[in-house]
């Protein structure tokens, strides 16, 4: 019971950290969706010395999605627990979490907060925002490969979400280990988000 309460409290703090103030007034009459950690993740892949591809992901993410399709506006704020990093190989996980790469001990959390949504007709096209990682914040543009809303038969409420892709230069965030030795600086990210609609408290 206590652990469940603590987990919910931590989730609330994480949501507050990425949501900011005045978001709803910016988006307008947007519906709010709490991101589902089971359907929200950031996965990465990077060339490994020109021979193969290293891949992994970050899980148990939290945050909010706000979506107003009629106004063609939206907002998404995501908290990324860096300690959740998983590649399937424990030794590799530990190396990536070290000071050589993500320095998880000093920077346990990363954040993404959107600043602009672009639409193509009634479809979400891109989401631009700020990615804060290792204490550095730089803009990132995510390209939507799909985005949709549906009535969840499991949750009994509307759910919205999609898949997004981008490629970042990791050296902008100070991650430059082995860039001279064969591990490319460009990292592909695939971002999966999905949230369940929250009751309107107004």
Image (cartoon, rainbow, N blue to C red):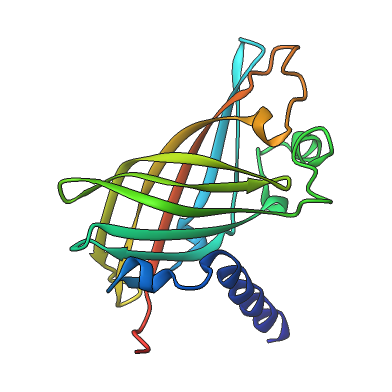
Instruction: Locate residue 179, reporting x and y percent.
Output: 72, 18
Occupied quadrant, residue 66: bottom left
**Above or below, comparing residue 143 to residue 64 in the picture:** above
Taking 115 as reference, is 20 above or below it?
Answer: below
Against 179, residue 5 (above or below) is below
- Who's the residue at 44% across and 39% down the image? 141
The N terminus - image quarter: bottom right
- Residue 70: quarter of image: bottom left
Looking at the image, which residue is at 63% across and 74% down?
A: 13
The image position of residue 160, as x and y in percent, is: 32, 62
Q: In which quarter of the image is residue 102?
A: top right
Q: Which residue is drawn at 29% across and 50% down?
A: 147
157 to 150, vertically: above or below: below
Q: Which residue is drawn at 68% across and 28% down?
A: 171
Query: How many numbered dots are placed on residues in this image?
Result: 0
Residue 199 % position (x, y): 35, 84
Which quadrant, please, contains the C terminus? bottom left
Residue at the left extreme, as displayed: 121
**Residue, far bottom:** 202
Q: Where is residue 172 in the image (x, y as percent from the top left)?
A: 65, 32
| Left or right side of 113 for 47 | right
């Amino acid at each position: 019971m206590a652990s469940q309460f603590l987990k919910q409290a931590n989730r609330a703090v994480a949501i507050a950290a990425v949501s900011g103030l005045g978001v709803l007034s910016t988006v307008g009459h947007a519906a709010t969706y709490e991101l589902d950690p089971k359907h929200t993740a950031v996965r990465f892949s990077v060339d490994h010395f020109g021979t193969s591809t290293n891949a992994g992901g970050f899980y148990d993410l939290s945050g909010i999605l706000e979506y107003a399709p009629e106004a063609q506006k939206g907002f998404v704020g995501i908290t990324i627990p860096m300690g959740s990093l998983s590649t399937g190989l424990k030794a590799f996980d530990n190396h990536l979490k070290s000071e050589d790469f993500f320095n998880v001990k000093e920077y346990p959390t990363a954040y993404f907060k959107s600043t602009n949504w672009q639409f193509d007709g009634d479809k979400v096209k891109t989401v631009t925002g700020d990615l804060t990682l290792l204490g550095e914040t730089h803009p990132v543009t995510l390209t939507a490969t799909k985005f949709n809303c549906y009535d969840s038969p499991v949750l009994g409420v509307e759910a919205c979400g999609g898949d997004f892709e981008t490629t970042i230069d990791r050296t902008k965030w100070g991650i430059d280990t082995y860039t001279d030795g064969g591990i490319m600086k460009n990292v592909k990210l695939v971002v999966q988000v999905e949230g369940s609609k929250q009751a309107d408290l107004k």
